[in-house]
Image: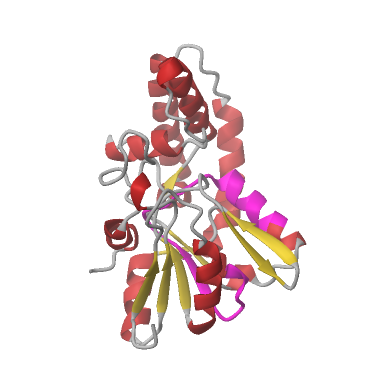
Amino acid sequence: MENNKVTVVLGAQWGDEGKGKVVDLLAINSDIVCRCQGGNNAGHTVVVDGKEFDFHLLPSGIINSKCTSVIGNGVVIHLPGLFEELKKNELKGMEGWQQRLIISDRAHLVFDIHQQVDGLQEAEKGKNSLGTTKKGIGPTYSSKATRNGIRIGDLLGDFNIFEEKFRTLAANYERMFPSLEVEIDSELVRYREYADKIRPLVRDTVAYLHTEIEDGKKVLVEGANAAMLDIDFGTYPYVTSSNCSIGGVCTGLGLPP
């Protein structure tokens, strides 16, 4: 690792291999720790000085005060879950994260509606259900692939355009699932507040990472899930909805092999 520009920690099985602990150890000698794919459907636990920190969206390295943490463009982000995770770990003693957390403007948003749809789709499968976490990860990646997803950058741009996109997304799902109930107006109020909270943390992470690597900074990438859950190379269809093998690092952060 001493001579590596970028070091990647991935699981080779179905998760729970201890990636979080390894990342926490390697972060000591890293300048930047990144998440490249997945969402809050996976979790890493790190124990520091007897305190147990739980991470689902945040890179485990965020508890290292000398590291910058990056949530890359390949990650799908449920903002209520992110803020809850930050608050929970802040109460346990995680300090100064505001100065060392960077979020990609290209990352897609997981809405509550995605989580509801996740549950409805799973219920429709009956005995053939896949055991989804119902965190909305699959529907969000589906929205991304069908090009009606909404990104962090959309939230921080013209809010009228964001509102139009959100109403279109909700209307599409309501046609597909008549039993779906979406409080569109209250969601828009909530996301207007989220925009102000998240704005200071957002930037072009692709440009940032390339600049930092060129300046000699060491990057550590923390994979979520594991190779056997990869959408292309895992035990399909019992997989997650992202590429959690090495290819997901390149596309999820904008870094070359």
Q: Where is residue 154 in the image (x, y as percent from the top left)?
A: 41, 47
- Figure check: 216 above or below 203: below
Image coordinates for residue 55, horizontal then vertical, percent: 59, 57
Percent position (x, y) of residue 232? 25, 44
Image vertical order of residue 146 relative to residue 54, above or below: above
**Vertical order, 52 against 234 (above or below):** below
Residue 61 shown left or right of residue 130 in the figure? right
Q: Which residue is drawn at 44% across and 55% down?
A: 224
Residue drawn at (71%, 55%), measured in percent from left and top? Answer: 88
Q: Does the magenta stretch include residue 86?
A: yes
Choose top left, top right, bottom left or bottom right for residue 235.
top left
Going 43% across and 23% down the picture, which residue do you hit? 129
Quadrant holding the C terminus = bottom left
Residue range highlighted in magenta:
62-88
Quadrant where the N terminus sits is bottom left
Residue found at x 53% / y 44%: 78
Total number of numbered labels?
0
Q: Is residue 237 magenta?
A: no
Colour scheme of the picture: secondary structure
| In-front residue for pair 170/185 | 170
Q: Which residue lies furthest to the left in this view?
A: 257
- Estimate the x, y position of residue 183 in percent, counting from the top left: 58, 25
